Image: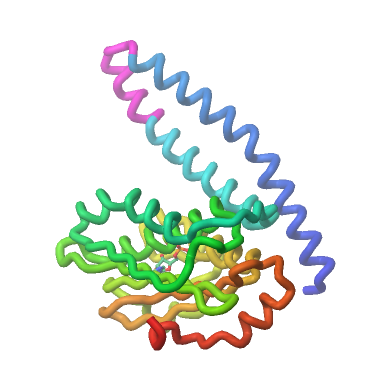
């Protein structure tokens, strides 16, 4: 397909998603009001209706999530670049996930190396990206067996690296190629938009993301980011970097 045709289809799909967004939020709001009304009535009919309304609300929320993801993904983000302490950002995320990890018998660990307090990035977006990777890592571990999720961060010259490692189920080789494709998911109720979003955010920062995985053993994602995407030598630094941070940490 030609590039202009692709762009045309892209903007058509974007317009469609945007048009769906408003009626969808009206639908959601109205269902919530209806739900409130039904709760006030304790007849058998009202109780049955309430259960149906809950199903509708769940499905509408799922649609809403799909549309939101699509719009963010299709349009990209305007980065708000600010000096950020990556160590702090990661510690906050791990704290946020602490209770959930514990409930699933998962130990969270954080190792870091070098000065992480002067990265220039969009903290909200990077947090979203790391949260997606961490949630996938937690999901990969069977809670009856438990396991470990390790985050490692380092800065080397003009490049920052973040690894998210889990001792989970790993990824079948046949799926490696599909991992970053929109809507690819192996989870019940999954959106398949997590990794495409992560990649999008990393690339918007001028960085790159790779992974390696062994079935039954676990998975390691590696994000490399220029310490300051505004510096024009940042890209060269990215190309020059050694892709095996394990050797230095
Ligand atoms: N750490 C991981 N370990 C094993 N499989 C993973 C991991 N991260 C992602 N995957 C696989 O990639 C798929 C897509 O992930 P993602 O885009 O985040 O969507 P979702 O989490 O909604 O399924 C997952 O369904 C899972 O099969
Ligand atoms: Mg996910």
Q: Residue at x 53, y 63 (%)?
A: 198
Return the x and y of residue 130 as percentages of the image width and height. 46, 60
Question: What type of secondary structure mainly makes up the magenta span?
Answer: helix
Return the x and y of residue 119 as percentages of the image width and height. 56, 63
The image quadrant of residue 159 is: bottom right
Q: Is residue 42 magenta?
A: yes
> Does residue 217 appear in this view?
yes
**First to last magenta residue range:** 40-53
Q: Is residue 75 magenta?
A: no
Specify how the rendered protein is coloured.
rainbow
Pick the residue in front: 200 or 62. Answer: 200
Q: Residue at x 41, y 82 (%)?
A: 212
Pick the residue in front: 248 or 104. Answer: 248
> Does residue 178 appear in this view?
no
Q: Residue at x 56, y 85 (%)?
A: 241
Q: Residue furthest left?
A: 144
Numbered circles on residues, count: 0
């Amino acid at each position: 397909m030609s590039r202009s045709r692709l762009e045309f289809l892209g903007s058509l799909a974007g317009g469609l998603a945007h048009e769906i967004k408003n009626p969808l939020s009206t639908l959601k709001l109205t269902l919530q009001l209806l739900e409130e009304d039904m709760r006030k009535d304790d007849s058998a009919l009202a109780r049955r209706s309430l259960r149906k309304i809950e199903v509708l609300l769940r499905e509408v929320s799922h649609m809403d999530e799909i549309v939101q993801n699509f719009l963010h993904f299709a349009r990209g983000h305007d980065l708000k670049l600010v000096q950020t302490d990556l160590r702090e950002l990661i510690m906050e995320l791990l704290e946020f996930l602490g209770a959930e990890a514990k409930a699933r018998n998962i130990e969270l660990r954080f190792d870091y190396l070098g000065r992480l307090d002067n990265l220039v990035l969009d903290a909200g977006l990077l947090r979203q990206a790391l949260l997606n990777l961490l949630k996938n890592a937690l999901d990969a571990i069977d809670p009856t067996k438990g396991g470990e999720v390790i985050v490692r961060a380092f800065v080397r010259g003009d490049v920052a690296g973040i690894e998210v490692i889990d001792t989970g189920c790993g990824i079948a080789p046949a799926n490696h190629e599909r991992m970053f494709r929109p809507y690819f998911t192996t989870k019940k109720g999954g959106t398949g938009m997590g990794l495409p979003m992560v990649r999008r955010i990393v690339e918007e920062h001028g960085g790159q993301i790779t992974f390696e995985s062994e079935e039954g053993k676990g998975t390691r994602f590696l994000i490399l980011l220029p310490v300051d995407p505004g510096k024009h030598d940042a890209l060269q630094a990215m190309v020059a970097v050694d892709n095996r941070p394990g050797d230095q940490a």
